[in-house]
Amino acid sequence: MSLRLLHITDSHLYHDPTRVLKGVCTHDSFAAIIADAYRRFPAVDAVILGGDMAQDEQAATYRMLDSMLPHWQAPVMITPGNHAALEHLYGELIPALKAHTGYRDHVQGRHWQIIALNSHQAGHVAGRLPETELARLQQLLSASATTHALIALHHHPIPISSRWMDAIGLENRDELWNIIRRHPQVRALLCGHIHQPLDVMHDGVRVLASPSTCVQFIPCSDTFELAALSPGYRWLDLLPDGVISTGIHRITGIFQSGITRWRPDTLYSCASFIFPVGEELQNSRQRLFLVHITTRQGEVGACLV
C-alpha cells in the first residue's frame, strides 16, 4: 500500500492576520492553501510542515497555526527552518499537535520510513544539521535497511544555481550525503526554503522542493527576485516499489503585487512551471507565449515557451 504525504512549507505567518509580506497576506494565502489541500486530499498518511512557518517567531503565531490546521487523521511532521523559535515550537505547537492530529518526527511504514530533520541554526539564515540529528539519521537508516526512505528537512541539500540562495543553504550537506551514500534505500530528500519547485536527481537520489504558501522566488537568479506565481504546495504518493509520484498544486486568486520584472528566458532555461487556470501574469513587460497543457494528474495549466 502506498503512503500519501503533503508538504506545506514557508508560510511566514504573523500573529497579526492582516500583515503582508512582499505583497501577500500570508494568513490568507496559508488559509487558502490549507482549504485546497484538505478538499483535494482529505485522507493522508502524514502532513509535513516545512520551516519558516512563523515569520515573527511568536508563541501566538504557532498557536494560530495549530488552530488553522484541519483535522487530518494523520500525524504532522515538522522540519524547522531559519525562521523558528524552538522554545515556542516545542512549547506551543508540538504539544498542541499531539493533542489534536498527532505529531511525529519519524513515520515507519511497511515499505517506507519518513524521517524529519531539524536544520535550524540559531542566529543564522543558512542551515546546519547538528551531530545529534546526523546520528539519529544514521541510526534510523541502519535499523531499517530494507525499507525505502524519504528524508525531509528545510534547507536545500544541493546547489540550485541560484547564488544568493546557495549561500544560505545547508552548510554541512557533505556530511548528510556521506550518510546517504552508505544507505542505498534512501529514495528522496524533500526540502523547502527556496520558495520554488525542484525535482532533480543527485547521486542517484531524487531531490524535491516545494513552493511557498506565500511569496515565490525566481529560479537560477544571482540575486533576490520574486516570481509572478501563485502560492502552492506539494503532494506525494510513496509507492511500495520505491517509486514516488508527486505534483504541485497552486491556488488561484492570490497573487504577488508589485512584480515589475519577468524573466521568461531564465524560467525556460532552468525549469518548467505550471500556471493554474485563471492566474494572470500581471505587470509583465515582456511578451510571453503560453502553451496550455494537461498533466498526468489532470491539472490543466500552461508553460512558458
Image: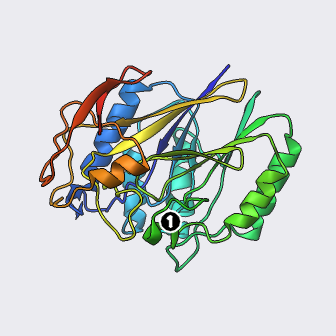
Quadrant of the rendered image containing residue 104 = top right
Q: Amino acid at mark 1?
A: His
Crowding near the residue tagged with mark 1, few <14, some 14–19, many ≥20 C-alpha atoms within 10 Å: some
Q: Is residue 46 left or right of residue 247?
A: right
Residue 64 percent coordinates (x, y): 36, 53
Quadrant of the rendered image containing residue 272 = top left
Residue at the image point whose x is 28% and y is 37% from the top: 275
The colour scheme is rainbow
Q: Quadrant of the N terminus?
A: top right
Q: Is residue 286 among what the camera can see?
A: yes
Q: Is residue 302 left or right of residue 219?
A: left
Q: Quadrant of the C terminus?
A: top left
User: What secondary structure is marked by label 1?
Assistant: helix
Quadrant of the rendered image containing residue 157 = bottom right
Q: Is residue 112 left or right of residue 249?
A: right
Residue 178 percent coordinates (x, y): 79, 60
User: Of 118 and 158, which appears nearest the observer?
Assistant: 158
Residue at the image point whose x is 23% and y is 35% from the top: 290
User: Of 199 and 85, which appears nearest the observer?
Assistant: 199
25 lies above or below 44:
below
User: Of 246 and 264, which appears nearest the observer?
Assistant: 264
Q: Is residue 213 among what the camera can see?
A: no
Residue 39 percent coordinates (x, y): 36, 26
259 lies above or below 2:
below
69 lies above or below 122:
above
Residue 285 percent coordinates (x, y): 12, 55
Residue at the image point whose x is 46% and y is 47% from the top: 210
Residue at the image point whose x is 43% and y is 22% from the top: 297
Q: Which residue is mark 1?
A: 88
